[in-house]
Image (cartoon, rainbow, N blue to C red):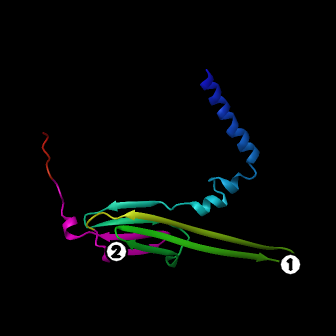
Amino acid sequence: MATKELMRRGEMFPSIFQDFFKPWDKWFDTDGGPLSRMMTMPAVNIMEKPDHFEISLAAPGMKKEDFNIDMEGNMLTISAEKEEQKENSDTRHTRREFNFTSFSRSFTLPEGVLKDKIDASYENGLLRLILPKTDEARRPTSKRITVK
């Protein structure tokens, strides 16, 4: 019975605190406040095709100049930084807004990728990397394993 009572108390406290901090929660949590916009990681899809791997990264609102793609050993790192400044002024008020967005994603490349042939393009908010496979990696590998 004590466990159920504690669970009920535990359920009570978040709602009390959430209500208390409601005016400010947009600044601190990940419900779409400014902090969550700065800390969002772009969605990534990785596909294996017969002759290459394809990495697609959703990053709308960026420019191709905002991206850095680096390779160190078998580690491929995609990062971006974007800073925006907006200023609206009239005779009575001046408003300045600063927005800074950054992210970094790293991927360990599988064996058989031609590292010097990797190609990247950015169009309609989608960064696309094509990682060609070596001839050996392109060959289908199938093997029957016997149970001992």
Inspect the magenta stretch and tell me whether residue 131 lies in it: yes
Split into 4 quadrants, where in the image is the C terminus? top left
Split into 4 quadrants, where in the image is the N terminus? top right
Q: Residues within 10 Å of mark 1 (few under 14, many from 20)?
A: few
The reply to whether the C-beta atoms of the residues labelled 1 and 2 are less than 8 Å apart is no
Residue type pointed to by label 1? Thr
Inspect the magenta stretch and tell me whether residue 39 lies in it: no
Give above or below for 82 relative to 26. below
Q: Residue at x 71, y 44 (%)?
A: 18
The image shows residue 3 at horizontal and vertical percentages of 60, 25
- Res 108 quadrant in image: bottom left
Q: Which residues are magenta?
A: 113-142
Give above or below for 42 relative to 93. above
Q: Residue at x 74, y 48 (%)?
A: 21
The image shows residue 53 at horizontal and vertical percentages of 32, 65
Residue type pointed to by label 2? Ile
- In primary-sequence order, the first of circles 1 and 2 is 1
Element under disc 1:
loop
The image shows residue 144 at horizontal and vertical percentages of 13, 48
Give above or below for 89 relative to 109. below
Residue wearing tag 1: 91
The image shows residue 29 at horizontal and vertical percentages of 65, 52
Count every numbered label the image shows and give the total: 2
Q: In terms of depth relative to the viewer, which is nearer, 123 or 106?
A: 106
Q: In terms of depth relative to the viewer, which is nearer, 136 or 51?
A: 136
Residue wearing tag 2: 118
